[in-house]
Image: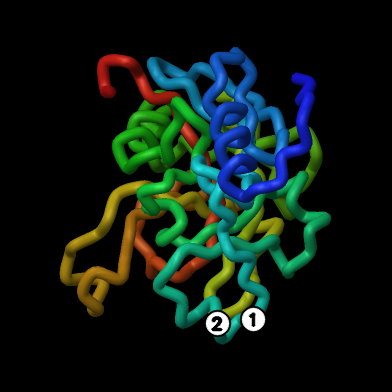
Amino acid sequence: LVFAKVITTSAAVAFVILLLSCSKSRKVHDLEGHNYKTIKIGNTEWFAENLQTAFFQNGDSIPNILEDSLWFSLSTPGFCYYDNNPNNKNTFGNLYNWYAVNDKRKICPCGWEVATKSHFGELSRLFGGDQVSGKSLKDNSNRLWLGDTISTNVSGFSAVPGGHRNEHFERSGKYAFFWQKDDYHGQACFTENLCAYECSILSDFSYVNQDFGHKYRGMSVRCVKIEKSMK
C-alpha cells in the first residue's frame, strides 16, 4: 500500500492500523507486520506459533511492564518479553497477563480469538488425551526443550518452552504455559475472581496439564480462527 499523504493525527493512524489489521488478506498478521504461521488441527485453525503483538486490535498499545513488583500487583493489561529481553520475542513470543487476554479491545488479529478451555481440551483429545498428548504438541526442530527426548510434533502445533512470569521470570526451556480465555470461578483459587484457566506442557513428560492460575501471571497466547457459525 502507498499513502499519498503523511498521516499526522493519532486518530488517523489508529484508523489506518485498523484497516490494515482487518483487511481480507489471507495472510494472518498483527499490527507490527508479523505474519503468523497457522495450521488446521481437527476442525480448528490454530496459530502455529505464539502471539507477539504489543497492540490491541484497535491500535491501542499494551503496556510493556518491566518491574517485577508492578507486574505482580497489576490488575490491568500488560505484556513483557521473557527476562525483559526483546531478543526472546521471535523464539518464544510475548508473555501476557490475563487482563490483556480478556480485554474487550481484543488481543488476537481480526477474525481470530484467544483459544478457550474447550479448544485446548479438543486439541489434547485429538492426540490421545492429557496423559500422552504433550509429546505430539511440542516443537522438536530447534532443540529448545531442555532434556526432551520424546517430542514428535506430529500435530504441527509447535509448542515452545517460553516459561512464564510469576513474581519473577522462570522455567524457560522446561515449560510452555498458555492462557485460556475462560475465567475461573471455583473456590480452589482461594481469592475470588483472581484466577483463570491455563494449559501447560513440560519438557521431559508426555502429559498436558489443564489447570488454573492467577491472572497477573505472564503466559504465552495462541489464537484460533473464529468460525463463521460462531459469529
User: Residue 203, percent across and down?
Assistant: 63, 51
Looking at this rendering, what residue extends furthest in the bottom direction? 69
- Name the quadrant containing residue 87: bottom right
User: Residue 218, percent across and down?
Assistant: 53, 63
Where, quadrant-wise, is the N terminus in this rendering? top right
- Name the quadrant containing residue 86: bottom right
In the image, residue 70 above or below residue 8: below
User: Residue 122, percent across and down?
Assistant: 34, 30
Q: Could you tell me how many numbered marks the image carries?
A: 2
Circle 2 residue: 70
What kind of residue is marked 1? Glu
Q: Residue at x 58, y 30 (%)?
A: 21
In the image, residue 167 above or below residue 48: below
The reply to whether residue 52 is visible in this rendering is yes
Question: What is the C-alpha distance between the residues marked 2 and 1?
Answer: 5 Å
In the image, residue 222 above or below residue 47: below
Q: Residue at x 77, y 37 (%)?
A: 6
The reply to whether residue 50 is visible in this rendering is no
Question: How would you rate the neighbour count of disc 1 (Cα within 10 Å): few for under 14, some for 14-19, many for 20 or more?
Answer: few
Q: Is residue 192 left or right of residue 151?
A: left
What kind of residue is marked 2? Leu
Q: Residue at x 41, y 34 (%)?
A: 124
Q: Residue at x 72, y 34 (%)?
A: 33
CB contact under 8 Å: marks 2 and 1: yes
- Name the quadrant containing residue 5: top right
Mark 2 falls on what kind of element? helix
Query: Could you say which is closer to the camera, residue 199 or residue 193?
Result: 193
Mark 1 falls on what kind of element? loop
Circle 1 residue: 67
Q: Is residue 140 left or right of residue 12?
A: right
